[in-house]
Amino acid sequence: FAVSDFKSDMVYFFSDRGKILNKIGGTGNGEGFFHGPKGLCFDGRGFIFVVDGGNYRVQKFDLSGKFILSFGKMGDYEGELANPTDVAVLGDSVYVTDTSNKKIVVFDHYGNYTREILMDELASPRGITARGNTLVITDEKTGVIFYDTVSGAKSVFNSWEKELNSWEKEKKLFRPLSSIFDQDGFFYVLDSKPNSVYCFSPAEKQYSNLELEITSVDTASFPVVAFYVNVK
């Protein structure tokens, strides 16, 4: 897996055991350099896409860290990015969230602009992942938007019922920044305002929903970051 380090303008590649295998980047605007790297994703074809936020572009590398190409530029028009934050690959398309322009900008694997996705629900899109034919878009004002790229159908998730014995009738997302499904269908949402990670289980595995509260973060051994959480 890989992690972007916004402050140091680096991207680190790790083994499953957390050992650093490789790193790429450095501060700058040339090929392979970053100015505030943000979201990233692997495409399943042996490449990684990294949002280079401060340079208003997305860069593509192979798994050895070799620079392949970059695309995007600063602006508000078609194919331009005002505040790119995250990236996801689905089929032959690369989807980039543009938070300031309230849209999803779509490119092909060669960096050619193809279209934009606009919808009323996009108020401040931040995170984006893909699951099947569906884009899972995390909007810090709206909630989590599920968008079917085939049918165009969409739905919003931003609240859920609490247990019957709870004094709270409903829980909701306040400022979600990212979300993802794991291989077993569990759904995780990072909500920055209460500093929590929520875990939702699929119906067939719904023994209980977990609420993870981040109590502290230890960066003393960076790039290894330890999170201390309470499980409710």
Image (spheres, rainbow, N blue to C red):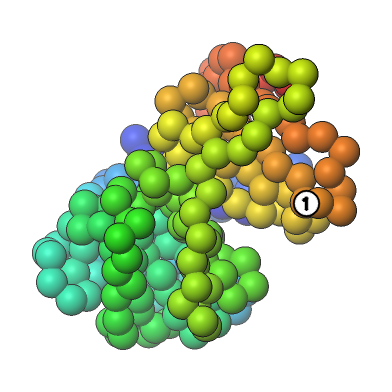
Q: Where is residue 215 in the image (x, y as percent from the top left)?
A: 59, 14
- Seen in the picture, residue 15 relative to 135 is either above or below; the reply is above
Is residue 231 at all visible to an observer of this figure? Answer: yes
Q: In this view, does 129 lie to the left or right of 201?
A: left
Residue tagged 1 = 202
Q: Where is residue 13 in the image (x, y as percent from the top left)?
A: 58, 51
Q: Nearer the viewer, residue 57 or 66?
A: 57
The secondary structure type at the circle numbered 1 is loop
Please give the name of the residue rendered at 34% of the width and 35% of the height, measured from the top-left corner.
Answer: 7
Q: In which quarter of the image is residue 225?
A: top right
Please give the name of the residue rendered at 35% of the width and 79% of the height, measured from the top-left corner.
Answer: 107
Q: Nearer the viewer, residue 49 or 94?
A: 94
Which corner quadrant holds the C terminus?
top right
Q: How crowded is mark 1: few (under 14 residues within 10 Å), some or many (20 or more)?
A: some
Q: Is residue 41 left or right of residue 86?
A: right
Q: Which of 35 and 200 is in front in this view?
A: 200
